Image (tube, rainbow, N blue to C red):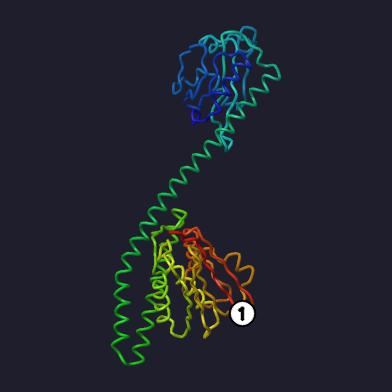
Amino acid sequence: MIQSIAAIPTIMRVIADTTGLRWVGVARVTPEQWTLCTVNDQLNFGLKPGDELEIASTFCDQVRRNNTGMVIDNVKTDAVYCTHAIPRDYGFESYFSLPVYRKDGSFFGTLCGLDPVPADLRAPKTLDTLKLFAELISTHIETEERLKETENDLKFERENSRLRERFIAILGHDVRTPLSAMLLGADLIGKLTSDEKIAAVSMKIKRSGLRIRGLIDDVTDFTRANASSALPLCLKPVDNLASDLEHVIGELAAAYPERSLQRNFTLTGALRCDPKRISQLLSNLIVNAIVHGFAHTDILVTASNQGSRLRIAVANRGKPVADETRQRMFMPFSRGAGTEQTDGLGLGLYIASEIAKSHAGSLRLESTGEYTEFIFEADCTT
């Protein structure tokens, strides 16, 4: 970790130049061990990063125990250390060792230096500079540890995200198979029976199935959008987009026969887009209009283009959208205020906005008087 901090070599070089000491190092110090982390060695002292010393044979152990630094200008004239074994064993006359701390205040190790000749280390400016560099190294250690923690957390979250996306994809695939059978069965029952009660039950089954399919699609897309910051698209030139949109309206008209879905399509030429995603966007906007609009009123769907500029809008009669609701309209898990329906996840408009972003387009809300309109626009150049 110490060697990965880019500023450390510069700090030690400046210390050597400032003090005249020809050996400066940073050591990790524990009650059991002294380990050299990095060094500026102009003496060919022989210690390399990773080398260890017996803790009792160093002054750094004293610094750790007393939690305070020590400085020796000249061993021979020092009243305390002139006869001490450590200076004699290592052959130095000048020496300093200052504590370095972790972000939680615990002792990490020392910034230390030595030289076979005396040096004026106790001079106030010199000592203040050494203390400042020790604090600076402590700050760098804190930053590096936080960075490592963040990287580890990010790696863990990415792995979780991949597992979550895989789980949801498998679940969605496994659920869609029996769901498709259920929808086909409901359609068949509705076509074969003349009994109104049975037909009504068939329609309820179909509507529930479509709602389940919508929930699966929304959760899958929400997971993908969060994992990759964008929904995957299959862009291609499309010259029959109106047909895809008609299919969406037809399906929802059958599922919600009590609502009137009016359309006005004037689409010409080829548009480069993902027709499935555009259909999904339209479906989400229509369902939103059904849920939040006034009952038994028309919902108007328009689609047009001017050259490559595509515009799709869904308008419904309803209460004006409050400013507070507008601010969170396209946020995930957000529902409009006052709605009694809670069978959705609140992802429909969020997914629609993500589809718009993926097409480098926009989705906006206009709400005036009794009318609310969602408008999607994008440049679909082929």
Closer to us: 273 or 106: 273
User: Dividing the image into 4 quarters, which one contains the C terminus?
Assistant: bottom left
Residue 83 relative to residue 193: left or right: right
Residue displayed at 52% across by 65% down? 377
Closer to us: 146 or 381: 381
Residue 363 relative to residue 225: left or right: right
How many dots with numbers? Answer: 1
Residue under label 1, please give it: 370
How far across and how far down the image is residue 210, in percent? Answer: 39, 75
Say few, some or many: other residues with alpha carbon within 10 Å of mark 1 (under 14 / 14 to 19 / 20 or more).
few
Vertical order, 206 against 66 (above or below): below
Closer to us: 358 or 172: 358
Residue displayed at 60% across by 71% down? 366
How far across and how far down the image is residue 208, in percent? Answer: 39, 77
Closer to us: 293 or 342: 293
Secondary structure state at the residue bearing disc 1: loop
User: Residue type at mark 1?
Assistant: Glu
Residue 79 relative to residue 30: left or right: right
How far across and how far down the image is residue 114, in percent? Answer: 57, 14
Vertical order, 53 against 334 (above or below): above
Q: Quadrant of residue 217?
A: bottom left
Residue displayed at 52% across by 37% down? 145
How far across and how far down the image is residue 157, in percent? Answer: 44, 50
Q: Residue furthest bottom?
A: 195
